Image: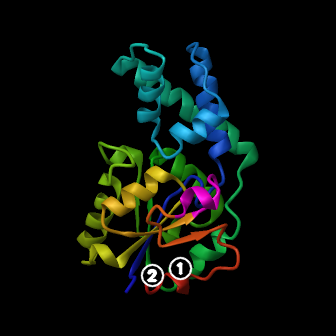
Amino acid sequence: MTEAVLFDFNGVLVDDESQHCEALQRVLADERITLTRDQYYAQYLGLDDRTGFVEAYRRAQRTLTTQLLKHLVTKKSRLYLELVATSLRLVEGAPEFVRDAAQRFRLGLVSGALRREIDHVLSKTGLADRFEIIIAADDVPRCKPDPAAYVAAHQAFTARLPIAVDDCVVIEDSLPGLQAARGAGMACVMLTTNHPARTLEGRGAALVWDSFAGHSASELADL
């Protein structure tokens, strides 16, 4: 029986992957590394910024120092916040679904985004007080598809009030996110925000939804 719902952030609550893509492209272009939109959605979607830059430099056969990595992550975050300041859009039906879910379940947010980005965007949505816990990229050593973030979320819930792992349901939009959720022992609902349904089906998702519109949190009760 579901007791808690863990939402991914980018592509699940906030429809902002295009802004993340543009920010990453612009930072890498300054470093003379080309990243196409197709490459971003195929290879970088669901990764945190640290892992994304490491992967881009690896593919370019370039050396990436710890100091440069920190600089690039900060630069990309600044660009992202500038972009969403003028083009913030929530996933269709997300606010209503979160408010509905909050009446039935404990809620958490588990994201590869930086905590300052999450806090900034949530402050614009009116949803910040709905989440009992938030796990951001800053909180775990390894990003999705590693299950560390969802394991940390379960631990954070349990520190407040014990809950079984399989009583937690995840809502994701990326394949690394799906793998992370399943690796943590949690059922996962997938949104087609950034992948077509045919890409997501047959990969272990409990449900695949086009959006939250037309769906009720009650549908998660028995997953």
Q: Is residue 127 visible?
A: yes
Q: Which quadrant: the N terminus?
A: bottom left
| Left or right: residue 170 compared with residue 211 | left
The residue indicated by pointer 2 is 105
| Residue 145 marker | none
Q: Position of residue 160 (x, y in %)?
A: 27, 73
Which residue sits at x=61%, y=75%?
Answer: 97
Span of residues in magenta: 191-201
Per the image, is 205 magenta? no
On the image, which quarter does residue 127 sit in?
Answer: bottom right
The three-letter amino acid code for the residue at tag 1 is Ala
Q: Residues within 10 Å of mark 2 (few under 14, many from 20)?
A: some
Q: Position of residue 115 (x, y in %)?
A: 45, 48
Per the image, is 200 magenta? yes
Q: Position of residue 72 (x, y in %)?
A: 49, 24
- In the structure shown, which secondary structural element does the residue marked by tag 1 occupy? helix
As rendered, which of 58 and 18 lies closer to the eye?
A: 58
Which residue sits at x=66%, y=67%?
Answer: 211
**Vertically, is 206 above or below 7?**
below
Alpha carbons under labels 1 and 2: distance apart: 6 Å
Which residue sits at x=65%, y=56%?
Answer: 196
Q: Is residue 192 visible?
A: no
The three-letter amino acid code for the residue at tag 2 is Phe
> How many numbered circles does the render carry?
2
| Left or right: residue 74 compared with residue 184 | right
- In the structure shown, which secondary structural element does the residue marked by tag 2 occupy? loop
| Residue 101 marker | 1
Which residue sits at x=64%, y=36%?
Answer: 38
On the image, which quarter does residue 63 sit in?
Answer: top left
The reply to whether callout 1 and callout 2 are in contact (CB within 8 Å) is yes
| Left or right: residue 103 compared with residue 223 | right
